[in-house]
Image: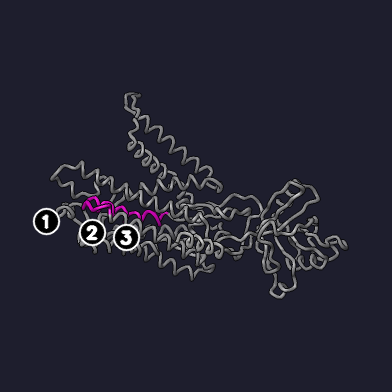
């Protein structure tokens, strides 16, 4: 069985390969070699999918010419060779036709402008039989500076797998965060019940000391505020993105401190108390605060360094989500249904709205990725790559992100992302399920475990849809039905639906008494 499963996964992985319009230029002289970014058009003439199968050509430097006519090249100068020319003065098709007529095997077009997939009129596609690709002008200069005038080049474009193991990393991060946040919330509830005075009204105050999403009006206001912020970010991204960055730094610092302090407390680490200026201070708290501030500042300074800063962003994001699920609580299943239902309706509306936008892109994807992430949203159809190092566009940090592992790209890093909405709001339901387990002393935390498994399965379905559709999706579209139906089914099967729906520890433990706090819902 395991062998058949392995064969099936390998076959699926081999099948799920797509040819993109980005390639690699391999430049070498003797044992020295270096690789650069290419953007090409496979409709002219496709290139090899591996370096070993690629043909080696001598490169002729005609970067002082635009190669718009045959007079720009000497007889037999390009025969059997690759040629690099400058972009401009004529179309890509004209340059390619002149190079082909002169005997060139490949034409590289050096560009000081952003690289786009080279295109021509439909009638010209059948006439050009050689590979046509754009490269950065600065890369061409670097190649000749590094290797000299006589260089050999190979063009290849390894197929980009639709499935990447970074999906599994995102799946692990999200499931771990939701599960751990729900576990923390239930553990905090158990501690409160153990320390509460017997017979007091505090038993009915399930959210004492915490912020509670309490009534229908607050739910609607909360969801409406999130929706308004989404729309404002879409239309005024350049301004609001910096507000979100500042908020993220402040909130994530506090959240990371809360998580680390809880871990230290659980491990029994000493507080290292001391007195200064007549006041008592905790050395452990000061050290943790300094560490958390340093991490947030480091992220803030290097937030656009894609190659490694995602690790810090995910660390801060996990802490933010954990602290949110522990601090905010929903006191019954009815409120979970209302909250998640309202969010689901909004996401369905956004999903439908993307069909009406001029570029077919959803508001949520535009806001999440930022207006400068054209290539990330292209799906491999039309590629735009910056020609020069420029100030990177700012992105909203409220996402978990993991770079592609199997498809390293010399043009730009590509990520799989998951917004915090797909973690914290489903996490509120998981946290409620664990608290209900605590209130009813349910065996093996049946509600918590089943809801967490439902979240995992919902995320799996979400990623399958993303892979098959090649389009970003809201995780809540799958998560909400999976989790609500699963939790409701468990409560119904155990004959506890009435108590699960009403919630509150006071009602669960003593249904003969009225709750000490009025409940609007």
- One can see residue 482 in this view: yes
Instruction: Check residue 262 for magenta coloring.
Output: no
**Mark 2 / mark 1, whichever is N-terminal:** 2
- Judge depth for marks 3 and 2 and give the one in front: 2
The residue where tag 2 is placed is 500
Q: Secondary structure at mark 3?
A: helix
The quadrant holding residue 373 is bottom right
Q: Which residues are magenta?
A: 420-445
Q: Is residue 133 left or right of residue 267?
A: right
The picture places residue 451, in percent across and down from the top left corner, at 32, 57
Q: Quadrant of the C terminus?
A: bottom left
For this orientation, the residue located farthest to the bottom is: 123
Determine crowd level at label 3: few under 14, some 14-19, many 20+ residues with C-alpha closer than 10 A: many
- In the image, taking residue 232 as reference, residue 261 lies left or right, namely left
Q: Which residue is mark 3?
A: 339
At horizontal 35% and vertical 60% (from top left) the residue drawn is 454
């Amino acid at each position: 069985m395991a062998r058949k499963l392995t064969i099936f996964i390998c076959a699926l992985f081999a099948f799920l390969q797509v040819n993109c319009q980005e390639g690699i230029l391999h430049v070498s002289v003797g044992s020295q070699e270096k690789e650069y970014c290419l953007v090409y058009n496979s409709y002219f003439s496709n290139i090899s999918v591996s370096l070993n199968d690629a043909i080696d050509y001598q490169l002729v430097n005609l970067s002082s010419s635009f190669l718009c006519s045959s007079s720009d090249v000497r007889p037999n100068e390009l025969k059997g060779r690759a040629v690099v020319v400058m972009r401009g003065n004529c179309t890509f098709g004209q340059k390619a036709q002149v190079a082909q007529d002169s005997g060139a095997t490949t034409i590289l077009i050096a560009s000081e402008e952003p690289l786009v997939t080279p295109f021509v009129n439909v009638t010209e596609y059948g006439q050009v039989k050689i590979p046509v690709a754009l490269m950065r002008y600065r890369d061409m200069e670097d190649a000749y500076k590094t290797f000299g005038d006589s260089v050999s080049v190979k063009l290849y474009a390894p197929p980009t797998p639709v499935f990447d193991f970074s999906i599994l990393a995102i799946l692990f991060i999200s499931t771990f965060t939701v599960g751990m946040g729900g576990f923390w919330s239930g553990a905090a509830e158990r501690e409160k019940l153990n320390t509460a005075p017997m017979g007091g009204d505090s038993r009915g105050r399930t959210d004492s000391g915490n912020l509670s999403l309490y009534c229908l009006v607050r739910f609607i206001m909360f969801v409406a505020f999130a929706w308004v912020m989404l729309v404002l970010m879409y239309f005024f991204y350049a301004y609001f993105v910096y507000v979100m960055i500042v908020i993220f730094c402040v909130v994530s610092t506090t959240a990371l401190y809360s998580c680390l302090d809880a871990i230290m407390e659980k491990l029994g680490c000493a507080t290292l108390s001391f007195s200064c200026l007549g006041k008592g201070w905790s050395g452990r708290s000061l050290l943790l605060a300094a560490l958390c501030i340093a991490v947030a500042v480091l992220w803030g300074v290097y937030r656009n360094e894609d190659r490694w800063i995602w690790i810090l962003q995910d660390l801060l994001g996990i802490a933010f989500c954990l602290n949110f699920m522990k601090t905010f609580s929903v006191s019954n299943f009815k409120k979970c249904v209302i909250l998640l239902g309202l969010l689901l309706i909004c996401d369905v509306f956004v999903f439908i709205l993307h069909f009406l936008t001029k570029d077919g892109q959803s508001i949520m994807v535009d806001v999440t990725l930022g207006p400068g992430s054209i290539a990330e949203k292209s799906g491999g159809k039309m590629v735009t790559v910056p020609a020069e190092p420029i100030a990177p566009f700012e992105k909203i940090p409220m996402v978990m992100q993991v770079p592609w592992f199997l498809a390293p790209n010399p043009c730009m890093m590509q990520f799989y992302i998951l917004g915090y909405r797909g973690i914290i709001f489903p996490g509120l339901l998981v946290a409620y399920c664990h608290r209900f387990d605590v209130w009813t002393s349910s065996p093996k935390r049946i509600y918590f475990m089943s809801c967490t498994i439902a979240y995992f399965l919902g995320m799996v379905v979400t990623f399958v849809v993303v892979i098959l559709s090649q389009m970003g999706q809201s995780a809540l579209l799958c998560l909400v039905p999976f989790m609500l139906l699963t939790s409701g089914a468990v409560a119904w099967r155990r004959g506890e639906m009435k108590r699960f729906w009403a919630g509150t520890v006071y009602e669960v433990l003593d249904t003969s008494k009225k709750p000490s706090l009025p409940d609007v819902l």
